[in-house]
Image (cartoon, rainbow, N blue to C red):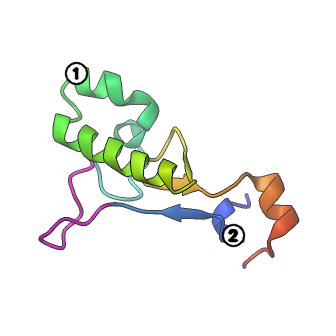
Amino acid sequence: DISLHNYGAAVDIGIIGDNDVLLDMGTPFDFFGELSEPKREKQLLENGQLSKEALTNRLLLRSVMLKAGFTPITSEWWHFNATNKVTAAAKFELID
């Protein structure tokens, strides 16, 4: 499946703290389980699987990225799109 990454139109990103370490986001990058899914954050917080700190950091990341014109997805806290696949295919060259 072709990803927006293949058009240079998506980014995986986090926030690095003063100690040069990724802020607590509840999971590392590329953890493909329910704990990484923004759509489940309320439930995960309520059942104690996601800390308030991790949620606050995720919300900060999303806020910054939204202000920069990117959109989040519901399944990965670290993934943001610059556009949709139709627009990307029309405007950009596919990267192998």
Q: Residue at x 21, y 52 (%)?
A: 24
- Mark 2, secondary structure of its residue: helix
Give amino acid for label 1.
Asn
Residue span colored magenta: 15-25
Quadrant holding the C terminus: bottom right
Residue 3 x, y percent position in the rendering:
68, 60
Specify whether residue 26 is in view.
Answer: no
- Name the side, left or right, on which 50 lies relative to 9: left
In whole angstroms, how far apart are the C-alphas of marks 2 and 1? 36 Å
Q: Which residue is mark 2?
A: 6
Residue 15 x, y percent position in the rendering:
30, 61
Q: Residue at x 49, y 51 (%)?
A: 67
Q: Residue at x 57, y 54 (%)?
A: 69
Please check the rendered image and state whether residue 65 is part of the magenta-colored stretch, yes or no: no
Residue 35 x, y percent position in the rendering:
34, 38
Specify whether residue 15 is in view.
Answer: yes
Residue 34, numbered label? none
Residue 87 figure quarter: bottom right
For the view shown, which residue lies furthest in the left direction? 19
Q: Is residue 74 above or below residue 30?
A: above
Q: Is residue 81 above or below residue 5?
A: above
For the residue pair 44 and 65, the one nearer the viewer reads as: 65
Residue 47, numbered label? 1
Crowding near pointer 1: few (<14 within 10 Å), some, many (20+)? few
- Mark 1, secondary structure of its residue: loop
- Name the side, left or right, on which 31 lies relative to 4: left
Residue 28 figure quarter: bottom left
Give amino acid for label 2.
Asn
